[in-house]
Amino acid sequence: MARSPVDITMSNGIGVTASLHPAISGGTPQMGFHAGAYVALTNPARFVDIPAGKDTKLAVLAGTTEVVGTLHDPDQQLVLKLAAGMTPTGPFLHDTAQDRDWTVVATAPKVDVFRDLGNDLKRLLPAGAATSLLMVGLVVWLSRRRLSLLGELTTAIRRREFIVHYQPIIELKSGICVGAETLVRWRRSNGETVRPDIFIPLAEENGLIEAITQQVIEMAVTELKDILAADRSLHIAINLAADDIRSGRVLPFMARLLDANDVHPQQLWLEATERGFMNAVQARATLEKARQSGHSVAIDDFGTGYSSLQYLQDLPLDALKIDKSFVDIIGTDAATSAITPHIIDIAKTLDLFIVAEGVERQEQADYLAQRGVHYAQGWLFSRPLPKAEFIEFYQNRQRAKGSAPEVIQRPEGRHPAGGVGGATPLPRSA
């Protein structure tokens, strides 16, 4: 067949004829695409075959001058002006999309858009007003609840409504129980238990945390003083808040309490997160006094903050606790699984004892033991226990294993303060 003239050549070399009238049938004009010796015919209506309201008009152009398809019969002159980048004024909205070969122009009457907007506003304004009232009510309710909870917390401190559970700490080498971490719970007068992650931040924000810390220490020492006196290698670990470290007032309180209950300072370990080290000068002063008194100091949740390495280097520490998030990924293909052995190597380099938190699978315990981690705690060994159940767990564990934990000297090369007289035996019960 005779070749039709090409109206435009696209960037890929294919020629386009905007309108080809069938020579035999005389039917709907087709669009022709020329490549080599062939011409492919396409119904131009396919280019604008989209669902649209009758007042939305659409035009597709090859380049900016050849209209090849339209929807709802747009004004051709207006389309060409818009395709050329002109912005004629009129009672319509328009938009243009363009690449190297094609241009699409869409128009719609302004009145239709604003009419639709008005209809939407009639539906949305009541819903928006109701949502706003709901949000205001929620804010008021939360504010009152928080103020109410703060008042209850203040009363709870005065009434001593807190209880302590003990998370056993196991020596991986021998399997015996060498200590426990104290975990505070708030039991309201109605029997309801409030989680620590709810009331501890509230106490820290309002200057109440030191009173709670002192009550926790007092309960732990008085509840466990008999087994602590019977086994001097046994210890309890106390979590200190930032205010406790900043003020240092907890140290003389502990000294009087331990002396009155015949518990050695070495049996009371102090744990603090990086948040407690934000004021490095005050933190160092408190921790050095604690270590001079015989307490051992551990950095808790190591690896979850931003300055852990700096704290390890600058502060007087004895132990490092690997956060549960790093223990969880042991034996997995997680991208961060390689971090755990590096944390262990760092602790070994700095002569720190290592405690792994949140151990839940035997695979994790085996991995940690093979890499020289001293101690572990988690649900693989036991959940946090109230006093009587912890004492029973400890005694059963000792009888089953039939041995006592190894007692070694506190590393002296790292921290000159090294306990009372610099040579106080340090149980491996970090």
Image (cartoon, helix red, strand yellow):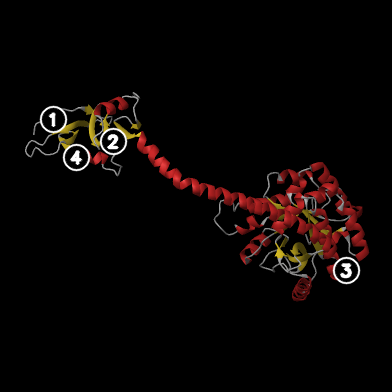
**Image x and y of residue 58, in percent:** 28, 36
Mark number displayed over residue 229: 3
Q: Earlier in the sequence, mark 2 or mark 1?
A: 1
SS category of the residue bearing label 1: loop
**Image x and y of residue 270, in percent:** 80, 56
Q: Amino acid at mark 3?
A: Ala
Distance between the alpha carbons at the discs numbered 3 and 2: 89 Å
**Image x and y of residue 175, in percent:** 72, 68
Image quadrant where residue 2 sits: top left
Q: Earlier in the sequence, mark 3 or mark 1?
A: 1
Residue at 88%, 49% (x, y): give it: 289
Q: Quadrant of the C terminus?
A: bottom right
Q: Is residue 397 left or right of residue 33?
A: right
Q: Which residue is mark 1?
A: 4
Q: Residues within 10 Å of mark 2 (few under 14, many from 20)?
A: many
Q: Earlier in the sequence, mark 3 or mark 2?
A: 2
Q: Is residue 125 left or right of residue 9?
A: right
Distance between the alpha carbons at the discs numbered 1 and 4: 16 Å
SS category of the residue bearing label 2: strand
Mark number displayed over residue 43: 4
Q: Earlier in the sequence, mark 1 or mark 4?
A: 1
Distance between the alpha carbons at the discs numbered 3 and 1: 106 Å
Which of 293/181 is in front?
181
Q: 71 above or below 235?
A: above
Q: 248 above or below 79?
A: below
Q: Amino acid at mark 4?
A: Asn
SS category of the residue bearing label 4: loop
